Amino acid sequence: MTDKTSTVSDQGPEKDIAMKAESFLPSDYQPAEDEPFMNERQLEYFRRKLEAWKADILADSRDTIETLQGSTRSIPDVADRASEETDRALELRTRDRQRKLVAKIDSALRRIEEGEYGYCEVTGEPISLKRLDARPIATMSLEAQERHERREKVHRDD
């Protein structure tokens, strides 16, 4: 007689991590300044936030592809055709920006796995939780980002 019940560990390490995460992160969890920076709960919170954001972008991309493939029709009116081509170009530019955003999300997820997430790549200091919550792909603290943008503006004006 074979035992058909499975344990968490029978389903692989990914399931183990997911089950562990489910148990220690309540659905209403918000990172707080009074807990240790980038503890397991905070990392899990940001990982989920990034993965949900990525899933939304990819779903939007699939919808766009289906729409663009389904709307390849001949429009006799020149103005209507130009308007539709402009709309398509705008949609494709938007999708290109989102493709780049997915790469940044993947990079942030890699930093979580490597233990580097939440720390400024310039100063090594922690990035504020408010900043990470607003922009979870941030790689610099607000101060470092502002310095970077000032330098960029000075060099751009040359």
Image: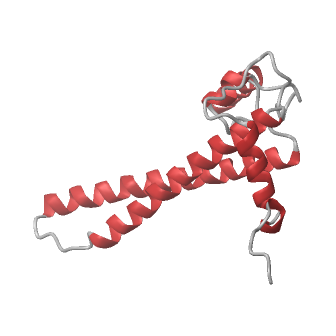
Residue 73 falls in image quadrant: bottom left
The percent coordinates of residue 57 (x first, y second) are 51, 52
Give above or below for 90 relative to 143.
below
Q: For the point 82% across and 68% down, which residue is it? A: 10
Give above or below for 22 relative to 144.
below
Question: Along the line of sight, which residue is nearer the eye, 136 or 87?
Answer: 136
Identify the image quadrant of the N terminus: bottom right
Q: For the point 67% across and 34% down, which residue is it? A: 26
User: Would you say 105 lies left or right of 71 here?
Assistant: right
The percent coordinates of residue 136 (x first, y second) are 66, 36
Spot the residue most to the left: 77
User: Would you say 75 lies left or right of 6 here?
Assistant: left
The percent coordinates of residue 132 (x first, y second) are 69, 30
Q: Confirm whether residue 82 shows in the render.
A: yes
Identify the image quadrant of the C terminus: top right
Question: Along the line of sight, which residue is nearer the eye, 30 or 150?
Answer: 30
Spot the residue most to the bottom: 1
Asked which colour scheme the image uses, the reply is secondary structure
Q: Confirm whether residue 149 shows in the render.
A: no
Q: For the point 77% across and 38% down, which residue is it? A: 43
Question: Along the line of sight, which residue is nearer the eye, 90 or 154?
Answer: 90
The percent coordinates of residue 25 (x first, y second) are 71, 36
Residue 41 falls in image quadrant: top right
Q: For the point 79% across and 76% down, which residue is it? A: 3
Spot the residue most to the front: 1
Question: Along the line of sight, which residue is nearer the eye, 92 or 119?
Answer: 119
Q: How many marks?
A: 0
Residue 152 falls in image quadrant: top right
User: Would you say 35 lies left or right of 27 here?
Assistant: right
